[in-house]
Image (cartoon, rainbow, N blue to C red):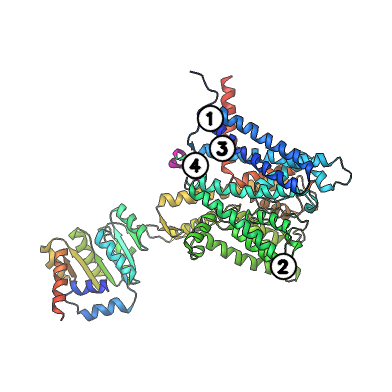
Amino acid sequence: MSLANNFETISQKVSVGDCFIIVQSHSMKLIILGAGPQGSKLAELALKDGHKVTIIEAEEQRAQAVLQKYNVKVFHANIAQGGILDEADADGTDALIATTSDDSANLMAMFLGKERNIKTLISMVNEPSHQGLFERLGVHVIVEPETIVAHHLYSQLKRP
Amino acid sequence: MKRRPFSLPVRLILHDLGILLNVPGVMALCSVPVCLWFGEYYAIAPILATATAAIVPGQLLYRLFPETGEARLRHAMLVAAIGWGMISLLGAIPFWGIATILSVSQNTPQTVLEFQNPWNALFESFSGFTGTGLSVAINASELPRSLQWWRSFTEWIDGVGIIVLVLAVLEPAMDAYQLYSAEGREKKISLTVNATVQKILWIYALYTVLSIVLLVVLGMPLWDSINHGLTGVATGGFSVRDDSIGTYSPVIQLAVVLIMIVGAISFPIHYQLLTQRRWSILWKDAQHRTLWLLLGIGTLVLFVENFWLSGTFLWTDSLFQWVSALTTCGFQTVELQPWGSGVKLLLSVAMIFGGTAGSTAGGLKLKRVVTLYRGVLWRFQQLFLKPHELMRYKLDNEVLTEAKAYRQFHAAATLAMLWIVSLSIGVFALLHFVPSEYILSDIILEAASALGNVGLSTGITDPNLHWAGKLTLILLMWVGRLEIVPVLLLFVSLLATASRVTNQK
């Protein structure tokens, strides 16, 4: 449910019902860029719901740590390296989620994902002024944790 | 300041050996009441001689080298290797002594007289103290009660010894074979027995008593029950009957199967079962899951193989012999020589695998079998990895780093290789000393049985076997009980010392 909640708060353009169906109906294949705190927590939530998770992480220590912790596929590579999404089998993937603290890496991942027609593209945006850049690509954007909390609170408010 | 002889590590080793020598001494003293109870007064002198021969030098070493200190893993291994050999040498005295005293009498059975040959006495003692159970006593039922007791007691003490060795010396060092890694070499080992190990030894004693009670309840005579209880939980395999467990009813045979399996379950797991009542651990632990799978599949395959070869249903016999081989106990219910070569080779594989690490069983131990299997899987998984994909090394519900995974696999593979080399040398040596009626599969079974401390025999172990054949089997039993590395270390250390002495001259 927690993942569904996240989807709900982060994606204003997709209706709540849609997302709920995606999460609940079948096991998805997800690619997560970045094995930082947000990336690995997301992996944990997704695994709990029975989804298949692949992580791409450029830093070896983080890559090893997430490999020890969760039953996930881990690629130790930089997104800027050519062909890494193909290695991670991006064509059969349902969602690509970029969680690094580097907006350029996130943006690159979104572009590459778009090129491969991945259905759901979600990215963390570290610098709010970049938000438009991402949204023009048709990416669901999460801007800063504070914004997420605010959205969440606001959505609670809307419910009777 | 007075200059002390020997370097500190050597003095520590001698101190520890002094303590270990108390073991056969105290064992001998505990055996005196058995001689008195059965009125075998002639046995008292040899048994007291054993006690003296053990305790006097033991106390001398202990007092001459009073330093205590934490030995390194290397030293602990040397103590184990020398200690096991030394105790077995002393354990031969009762066999030889009692046989020599009884040889004066006309109606002494041949089985007893054979022990006048020191090789036979040594063989029986090594077989006992390594928990093997190969016996040169053809008619074990004709042995004096004191000797029957001594045989069973040596195997039971071996069970204590191997539990302490693994839990107090080898396991704290993570794995015996970390000897190759930096931490292993520097790790300090204490030979003291901690509280957990003490509790585990109480469990061992408890299971022994329960086994004896079970056998008595099912109708086995009391004396037989005591002996088979001692050697069953210890997965030793000496019997006081000529036909081993084949003497008794199928119900008792099944009870013995249960006892053998209990002895082959890791004692730390028994401890967890008794204290936390988590039965699931028997399946969740990869080593024990392998034990159940091998027990089930093996029995079935052996049964089919026996049916294929002989056309008869040998349900109980297949089950019993397979369990006996895999748990490295060595009780028998049938003559093995007439069985087919395929069956003998299957039994040999079971004997090479052995029981779980942390139990009284011998062999490679299933923990290493699991690691080897995983290692082979990893090799194949790597072939399917994409260029940047990281390999996930999972062993026993734990994900290991690459370095650790390889160290574990390396240790297991090294031991497996040493095991195969030892077995091959043993088989090759035995080929020269064994009567011609025995074929290669018989010899492989006998060598695997000695190396895995099992005790199943095709009949090669015999009082009339050439002394070199007995020596080969003795060495296999000793090397196998200590898992080869400590004995190799002993030889290497001796060679190194010898070359240093020669260089100084």
Residue B414 visible in the displayed image: no
**Residue pictured at 57% horizontal, 64% vertical:** B292
Instruction: Decide whether residue B181 is among the magenta residues.
Output: yes
Q: Earlier in the sequence, mark 1 or mark 2?
A: 1
**Residue pictured at 28% horizontal, 53% vertical:** A59
Q: Earlier in the sequence, mark 1 or mark 3?
A: 1
- Indicate the amino acid at tag 2: Pro
Q: Do marks 2 and 3 share a chain? A: yes
Q: CA distance from mark 3 to mark 4?
A: 13 Å
Q: Residue under circle 4?
A: B179
Q: Are marks 1 and 2 in contact (CB under 8 Å)?
A: no
- Indicate the amino acid at tag 3: Leu
Q: Residue under circle 1?
A: B66
Q: Main secondary structure of the magenta part?
A: helix
Q: CA distance from mark 2 to mark 4?
A: 46 Å
Nearer the camera: disc 4 or disc 1: 1
Q: CA distance from mark 1 to mark 2?
A: 54 Å
Nearer the camera: disc 2 or disc 3: 2
Residue B56 visible in the displayed image: yes
Q: Which residues are magenta?
A: B176-186
Q: Residue under circle 2?
A: B250
